[in-house]
Image: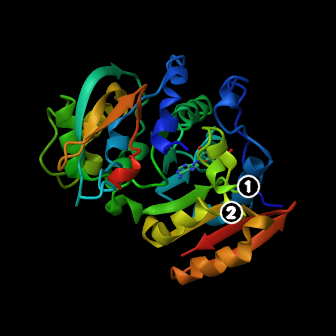
Amino acid sequence: MSEISIKTPSFNHLSAADLDLIYAPSEDTFLLIDALEKDLKEIFKLEPCICLEIGVGSGVVITALGSALGPSSLYFGTDVNEFACKKAEETAHLNGVTLKTFCCNFVDSVPDSVKGSIDVLIFNPPYVVTESDEILSSPLASAWAGGEKGREVIDKLFPSLSSILSPRGVFYLLLEKNNKPKEVSSILEQFGIFKSQAVIDNGHGKKNCRV
Amino acid sequence: MKTLLQLSNIFHDRINTIKSIRNMKLITHNMLTSNALKTVKEGYPLQIYVDEVKQVDVDFQQQFITKTVSKLNWKALLFGAKCIGHSEGLPETLPENWESNDELLKKLHHVLLEIEVITGSLECPETKRRFPISNGIPNMLLNEDEV
Ligand SMILES: C[S@@+](CC[C@H](N)C(=O)[O-])C[C@H]1O[C@@H](n2cnc3c(N)ncnc32)[C@H](O)[C@@H]1O
């Protein structure tokens, strides 16, 4: 048992109509929060200055982290879904966390000078195995549809990862078995400097990668 | 098949229904570049055009603002503040001992956290491509032929 725990943010402001347009907090969402909770001591020790979640969705994950770490870090979220960006800020605000979001692909619009200083990077990606053309078939599909092996979206992020994280940065990526977490580990290693460890949990693989 | 940008337009109508609360602040501006555009070298800082701004009250937390400023790019901050008409009293460079300069910290708190852009746009300094800010969220998505 870890002594520090993470409070699950409240998100009952999200209406059923909202959840037609954004990814509802789901089992994987909470797995990711659990993973952060498990590592919270380590994360504290990093004294993170910038935490960023890609695909912020409802915002509950970064909000959970933000309420545990407090305002000593800045919190940012990106999403290709503008509505999710807005809702995520709302979630954070209602839980006392200052989160700023912007709509972009991964972290494409973050300048290099900032990219290299992200201490905690989080991504619960669209990872469900689907046909390739399902990914952009509708706004909500782009929240979960991952194409072949569920990896078509995630794989595009990998090449830029090492320049995103700060030297002490950690990356939390949620995967499931079908995504071939081992293969992902070796891809990450090819891009340099990553040690990764996979934790299999309820059929979901959770990856925690450090530079 | 649609592009990400087309998909994102679908959300506009829905966002309009949120009467809310938080919008783009200068902290966010500091985090944005247009250099994902194929011909752009730096794309930073972006010019801000304001159509609608709002002032909000945020509690002053010295530790937070000090930490934030230490992480931000001062030139871009100053430029952003000029764009939105709030650069008065901000020095060209961050002076020594700024961490203990209460007056400066309060000013920075105000310009970084209490001024919010609801509607406007961000402009790439090199190509003049504009990115909309609507409902307080900057949209940096690009068309496929732009990357
Ligand atoms: C599985 S949902 C996770 C949402 C939320 N973080 C959670 O854990 O509940 C994936 C999110 O990533 C977003 N997304 C998909 N592709 C993206 C991309 N290329 N860049 C940024 N966000 C993306 C989707 O819009 C969606 O909100």
Residue ID at (73%, 59%): A35
Q: How far apart are marks 1 and 2 (CA)?
A: 9 Å
Residue A44: mark: none
Observer-nearest of A104 and B87: A104
Query: Label 1 crowding class (10 Å Cα cut-off): few <14, some 14-19, many 20+?
Result: many
Percent across and percent down for residue A118 are 46, 61
Which numbered disc flags the more N-terminal residue, 1 or 2? 1
Residue found at the far front of this picture: B1
Q: Where B109 falls versus A199 (above or below)?
A: above
Mark 2 belongs to which amino acid?
Glu
The residue indicated by pointer 2 is A148
Q: Where A86 falls versus A202 (above or below)?
A: above
Q: Which is in the foreground here, disc 1 or disc 2? A: 2
Mark 1 belongs to which amino acid?
Val
Task: Say if disc 1 is inside 8 Å of ligand 1.
Answer: no
Host chain of mark 1: A
Percent across and percent down for residue B79 are 18, 42
The residue indicated by pointer 1 is A128
Query: Label 2 crowding class (10 Å Cα cut-off): few <14, some 14-19, many 20+?
Result: some
Q: In the picture provided, is B112 more to the left or to the right than A65?
A: left
Residue ID at (62%, 33%): A95
Q: In the picture provided, is B68 more to the left or to the right than B48?
A: right
The image quarter containing residue B96 is bottom left
Host chain of mark 2: A
Percent across and percent down for residue A57 are 61, 41
Label 2: element kind: helix
Label 1: element kind: loop
Residue found at the far left of this picture: B92
Residue found at the far right of this picture: A202
